[in-house]
Image (cartoon, rainbow, N blue to C red):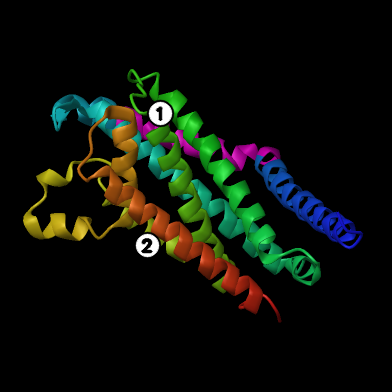
């Protein structure tokens, strides 16, 4: 081995170590923030989902009977879990990163030698972890109302991670473009919530008229809910491979957009 190779290898190792420390620091800060204000980050979704199970699953579900041959309470569990994961992943990163913009300490990240992918990866990982925490809590609550099964655990885990990643990246883009706190709330209220409720959480797409079924297939959340439902119940309204292709496509596209925004400093440099 030449003498020139050793310094180069040492320098690469030093850069990789520095990036890893930076990444872990951002993730740890996000997780600490989530756990420090657990009364705002973890308890509200647990209460909300409990009410959904009681009202839609218990009271209304007893009158509905079955959906696609599945007991209605069992049918809505995957959708409610995925809904909570999506909303909390999105909300975590949009509020956290916009808070960094508002407090002007995001500029410290931009002038540091930290690569853009480390900044984006750290914030997205923190948001995904919050989504997974809430998802586990909701799944545990569901066990009080129904028998939760996992016939396809790999599909279940991969779907929830991909769904959380997609909406963490989307929340990051929202935070970058937001100029005030109201801008952070616009997308969840007027776009995310309608897409979630119309994404097959509470009903099968087969119940809809033709035109409405066609429109539903243009809803990306519909594919995530159905892929997750396949993981928990073994049934889905769409082919599994279509759902995975769509989810992976969104991850790549949104990650590329997020990195481009960071490198260009769009909405970040005053």
Q: Which mark is residue 153?
A: 1
On the picture, is 61 further left or further right than 182?
left
Answer with the quarter of the image where residue 3 lies.
Answer: bottom right
Residue 54 within the segment the image draws in magenta: yes
Nearer to me, 231 or 202: 231
Residue 103, horizontal then vertical, whole percent: 74, 66
Label 1 sits on a secondary structure element that is helix
On the picture, is 88 further left or further right than 227?
right
Residue 146 within the segment the image draws in magenta: no
In the rendered structure, which segment of residues is drawn in magenta? 35-55
Label 2 sits on a secondary structure element that is helix
- Quarter in which the C terminus is drawn: bottom right
Q: Identify the residue position indicated by label 2 in the image.
A: 191
Q: What's the residue at 57%, 66% (across, down)? A: 175
Nearer to me, 37 or 120: 120
Q: What's the residue at 48%, 39% (across, down)? A: 45
Q: Image height check: is 239 above or below 254?
A: above
Residue 53, horizontal then vertical, whole percent: 34, 30
- Quarter in which the N terminus is drawn: bottom right
């Amino acid at each position: 081995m030449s003498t020139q190779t050793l310094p180069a290898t040492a320098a690469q190792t030093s850069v990789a170590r520095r990036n890893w420390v930076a990444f872990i620091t951002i993730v740890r800060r996000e997780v600490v923030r989530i756990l420090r204000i657990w009364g705002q980050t973890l308890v509200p979704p647990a209460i909300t989902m409990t009410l959904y199970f009681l009202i839609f699953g218990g009271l209304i579900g007893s009158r509905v009977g079955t959906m696609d041959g599945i007991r209605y309470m069992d049918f809505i569990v995957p959708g409610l879990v995925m809904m909570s994961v999506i909303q909390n992943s999105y909300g975590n990163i949009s509020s956290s990163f916009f808070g960094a913009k508002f407090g002007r300490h995001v500029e410290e990240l931009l002038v540091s030698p930290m690569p853009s992918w480390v900044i984006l990866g750290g914030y997205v990982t923190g948001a995904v972890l919050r989504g997974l925490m809430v998802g586990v809590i909701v799944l545990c609550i569901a066990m009080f109302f129904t028998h939760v099964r996992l016939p396809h655990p790999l599909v279940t885990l991969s779907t929830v991670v991909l769904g959380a990643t997609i909406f963490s990246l989307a929340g990051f883009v929202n935070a970058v473009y937001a100029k005030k706190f109201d801008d952070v709330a616009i997308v969840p209220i007027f776009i995310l919530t309608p897409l979630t409720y119309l994404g097959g959480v509470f009903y099968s797409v087969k119940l809809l008229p033709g035109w409405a079924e066609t429109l539903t297939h243009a809803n990306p959340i519909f594919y995530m809910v159905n892929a997750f439902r396949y993981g928990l119940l073994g049934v889905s309204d769409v082919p599994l491979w279509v759902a995975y292709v769509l989810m992976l496509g969104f991850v790549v596209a949104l990650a590329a957009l997020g990195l481009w925004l960071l490198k260009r400093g769009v909405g970040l440099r005053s």
